[in-house]
Amino acid sequence: MSTTPTAGDLPEDAGHRLEELGEGLFTSDLSVNEFLLVKEAGFHPLGFVMGSSIYHTGVQLRKFSTSQELTKLTEAMYHARELAMTRMEEEADQLGADGIVGVRLDVNYYEWGSDAAEFIAMGTAVKSEDGESYRNAKGKPFTSDLSGQDFWTLMQTGHVPRGLVMGTCVYHIAHRGLGQALGSMGQNVELPNFTQALYEARELAMTRMQDEATELEATGIVGVRLEEKTHQWGSHTIEFLAIGTAVERTGEAVTLPRPTTIISLDN
Amino acid sequence: MSVPTPPGVPAPGSVPAADVRAELRAGMASLAAPEAPSGAAVTSDLSIDETLLLHSIGWVPVDLVNGVSVYAVPGGVWVWSQGEIAPATEAHQRAVGAAVARLRRECEHVGGAGVVGVEVTIEVHPHHVDVELVGTAVRPAVAPPAGRRGHRGPLPEVFVSDLSARDFVLLHGAGWAPLGLAYGTSFVNVPRRSASTALQQRTQNVELANFTNALYSARESGMERMQETALHLGATGVVAVHVAEGPLSFARHAVQFSAWGTAVTLVADAHQRIAPEVVLSLDDRDIAFAAQSLRGR
């Protein structure tokens, strides 16, 4: 994408807090369970890192009866999320982290006027305790939306996270004409234009996500979620967001013990 | 029909306004009085499981304790100007500080070594900040040998933690101990956007730098204050950090950022591995089929 944010555009104030973190204090939004499991996986939390951007989404005209991708809106969603993610990665980089776990990517709408939203990414920067580098193919700290529990389990199966990958597509689904609506009244019938539009939008989002994973030289994507949101665009304009963690098999043996099966007797 | 009033408690409506203050003062005085109760019944908001877990590491609940503070915010601080709204920030910081101090004092008063499961309720109103902390005071079951002030092992004084009793037990097992509540907040004014800029940006994909910077500024100061309180407690980490951020409902030109979490430190010689066992539950989840779900979003 041509809209990739430039490095080093971290707002000035961000520096101070991170300097303090270098002096033996860590902060983390991990729960105690997650904290202990991240430690168990051989990582130590360094700091709670965040990135955000308040972004104004532009306007694009939609044709009432045409299904189409709204490229301007897609670009906006990409750009704003990347701004947030990149700023978070920069903070982690400054801390000398190997990666960021438990990343949450949210969009918040406040009453600041229409079309303005806060895109925010936050997570806990971690560093491996054995001194080995876990940075990804781009030399950046890996990002992952896996919880501490998932992170530990993944590491036990000989995989390492490589990066949070996502694909998005804002799609306008055509309204049906009066003739079509009348024609299908009272019948059991598939609505091909809707089906096709939804298919295409999802495909676009998934493909873009996979492309990002390929760039990271990942061998798979786990924990993929497909979210559909209309944000503030009305019912026929939908954002399809595919998001997951790209992982790479490091070839090491699986150390996950065979699970004990249990049946709990409480109800 | 009148409900009999227990001795010592004034019937509702019968207390003149002046007496309320006297009552309050008496209440505060009794709180400060150093009379330790012995053999009193234990009140706690812990579940049975949590109580048993506490027992498993040799700790017992002592009493339900709370700390409340209502701090006034000076009038006129919410007008739209520039930079940080220092009086509001200060009121917020002091309110939390006072509530924590009271919780500590109450815990000390009942003979606890710390407070776990503290529920943190913070409300910001235009003219005051309300902070309510409620938790359960706990202590080791076997009183440690009497002696100097630092007799509770490596813990210098009463700790306050918003971690549950179960988290406390887990941390304890891994060689960590909570030290206190780390908290920080900041209120910042959002710089204005000129009308022409706003108009220009109306149809564009563009970052609103003024909002972004204001949020960053609030976040950095808030987090830094939290880190300072943690460092002050001698902590090496803050876990389970909660954040609350966004514009205020009554002053949309101002953003608030608050963060709080439990400051912890390693008390054992090294981090103890917990070596989790992997289990697979064979219980079926309740699978309910709802015809409604077929109708789409």
Image: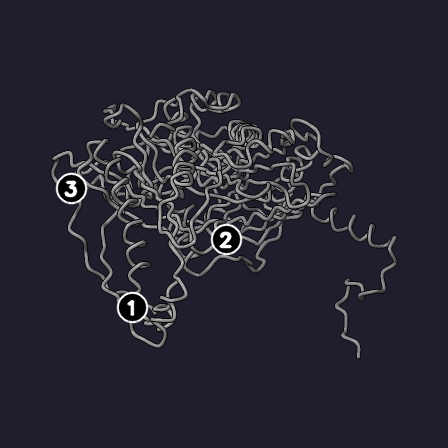
Mark 2 nearby-residue class (10 Å; few <14, some 14–19, many ≥20)? many
What residue is disc 3 on?
Answer: A255
Tell us which disc is closer to us: 2 or 1: 1
Mark 1 nearby-residue class (10 Å; few <14, some 14–19, many ≥20)? few
Q: Is residue B272 in sight in this rendering?
A: no
Across and down, in percent, residue B175 comes to 36, 37
Across and down, in percent, residue B145 comes to 48, 39
The residues tagged by marks 3 and 2 sit, at their Cα atoms, a distance apart of 39 Å
Q: Quadrant of the C terminus of chain B?
A: bottom left
Question: Disc 1: which chain?
Answer: A
What amino acid is found at the position of numbered circle 2 in the picture? Answer: Pro
Task: Please give the count of numbered marks on the rendered protein.
Answer: 3
**Residue at the far bottom in the pictured view:** B1
| A138 with respect to B199 (left or right) | left
Relative vertical location of residue A18 with respect to residue A251 in this rendering, above or below: above
Label 2: state its secondary structure: strand
Q: Which mark is residue B72?
A: none
Q: Residue at x 50, y 45 (%)?
A: B162
Circles 3 and 1 on the same subunit: yes
